[in-house]
Image (cartoon, rainbow, N blue to C red):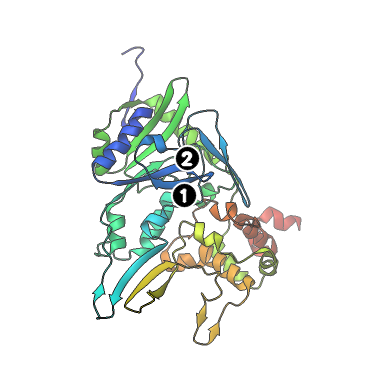
């Protein structure tokens, strides 16, 4: 009819109360709902009992070795970039018991955590990281392992990003700002004179079923176009970019480059980059016992390739220097990960830049390697030299 907006049948709109209702619906279905909230001067991930816990009106300022919470001039709940935690900690916990045993020889398996997770507010970079972890940790997705069950039962509400941070480079890694496949529902947050609302897309039948239980309306075509334009604009506002070269080949050829010694002079080998990375997956195990020796337990916890003992083998430590450890981390993350798992291990979230105490920037180090390796410089740059 004349004067009536055209509608987009594949997209819906929730208002702010509808987002709260979405969280309530997921909890009623038995999910442990996890999403962003403000705690300890940061936006962290925690269980949500209601939408009131979302970081309404909070944003962040980020840079190398810098992360600051700040107040926004609106009530956006997803108007922030990645915080110090990733969704990895729920799918691949930082510490978990493997077994316990008593002196009488009775082995006890840990009680399985059967409650399924629903993640709310997963950015494109983190959605890609979840897919990477799934390939790494679940080579057999149909297995009966606890980890495989966590991934199978997972419900994801993604958030198309319209607010890239100062250290984000997902656009150059092909992982954002739009959330790629793998979500059940995807939201694009919009705030303007027409109110606070979320344009919603269902990515799975499960997502559509949940959406059907929440008050919503069909999106107008103009609303969908506006949401897509906001995400496209965000791609041009990235704070960083990875060089557009074959990083796998670059790092293979740059093994003896001087840049490694230079970065090692700044690197503290603290391992912060691996702890905040959403795809680093290495672990180690430790056995503990009580003082009487009657009970013992084996625990698995995250490990880091920056730890001195990480590369210790029967003949000694094969990476004794900070130079060799940083080179191994960066070469694996951007290069040999392709050989193992068929993709990059980096999704461009920028956490390793944010949370490095001395502000080492992986995109800058990659750019330095490009300049040191003539074959990888852009043609116009090579001609000028």
Identify the mark at residue 71; answer none if there is no mark.
Answer: none
Residue 275 drawn above or below residue 16: below
In the image: residue 367, left or right of residue 24: right
Q: Residue at x 43, y 54 (%)?
A: 129
Q: Is residue 145 visible?
A: yes
- Find the residue positioned furthest to the front: 292
Pick the residue in front: 44 or 258. Answer: 44
Give the quarter of the image for residue 221: top left
Pick the residue in front: 216 or 110. Answer: 110
Give the quarter of the image for residue 343: bottom left
Quadrant in the picture for the C terminus? bottom right
Q: Residue at x 28, y 42 (%)?
A: 27
Give the residue number, with chain letter if any, for mark 1: 125
Q: Residue at x 42, y 67 (%)?
A: 301
Residue 10 drawn above or below residue 35: above
Residue 176 drawn above or below residue 286: above
Identify the mark at residue 161; answer none if there is no mark.
Answer: 2
User: Which tag, 2 or 1, sits closer to the chain's start?
Assistant: 1
- Find the residue positioned furthest to the bottom: 315
Q: Position of residue 224 (x, y in %)?
A: 40, 30
Q: CA distance from mark 2 to mark 1?
A: 9 Å
Q: Is residue 12 visible?
A: no
Secondary structure under badge 2? loop
**Pointer 2 and pointer 1: residues touching (CB < 8 Å)?**
yes
């Amino acid at each position: 009819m004349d004067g009536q907006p055209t509608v987009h049948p594949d997209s819906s709109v929730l208002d702010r109360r509808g987002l709260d209702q979405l969280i309530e619906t997921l909890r009623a279905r038995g999910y442990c709902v996890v999403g962003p909230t403000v705690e300890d001067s940061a936006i962290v991930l925690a269980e949500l009992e209601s939408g009131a816990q979302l970081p309404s009106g909070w944003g962040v300022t980020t840079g190398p070795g810098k992360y600051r919470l700040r107040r926004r001039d609106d009530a956006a709940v997803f108007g922030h970039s990645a915080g110090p935690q990733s969704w990895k900690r729920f799918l691949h916990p930082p510490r978990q018991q493997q077994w316990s045993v008593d002196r009488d020889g009775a082995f006890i398996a840990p009680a399985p955590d059967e409650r399924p997770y629903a993640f709310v507010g997963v950015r494109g970079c983190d959605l890609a990281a979840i897919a990477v972890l799934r390939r790494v940790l679940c080579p057999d997705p149909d297995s009966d392992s606890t980890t495989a069950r966590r991934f199978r039962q997972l419900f994801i509400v993604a958030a198309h990003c319209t607010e890239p941070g100062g250290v984000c480079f997902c656009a150059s890694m092909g992982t954002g700002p739009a959330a790629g496949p793998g979500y059940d529902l995807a939201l694009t947050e919009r705030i303007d004179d027409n109110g606070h609302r979320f344009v919603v897309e269902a990515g799975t039948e499960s997502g559509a079923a949940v959406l059907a239980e929440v008050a919503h309306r069909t999106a107008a075509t103009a609303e969908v176009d506006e949401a897509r334009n906001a995400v496209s604009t965000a791609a041009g506002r990235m704070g960083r970019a990875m060089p557009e070269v074959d990083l796998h080949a670059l790092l293979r050829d740059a093994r003896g480059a001087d840049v490694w010694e230079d970065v090692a002079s700044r690197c503290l080998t603290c391992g912060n980059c691996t702890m905040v990375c959403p795809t680093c997956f290495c672990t180690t195990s430790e056995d503990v016992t009580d003082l009487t020796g009657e009970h013992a337990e084996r625990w698995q916890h995250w490990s880091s390739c920056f730890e001195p003992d990480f590369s210790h083998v029967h003949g000694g430590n094969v990476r004794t220097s900070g130079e060799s450890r940083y080179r191994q981390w960066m070469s694996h993350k951007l290069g040999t990960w392709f050989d193992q798992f068929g993709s990059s291990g980096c999704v461009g979230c920028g956490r390793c830049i944010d949370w490095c105490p001395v502000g080492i920037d992986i995109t800058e180090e990659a750019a330095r390697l490009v300049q040191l390796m003539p074959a990888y410089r852009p043609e116009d740059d090579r001609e000028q030299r």
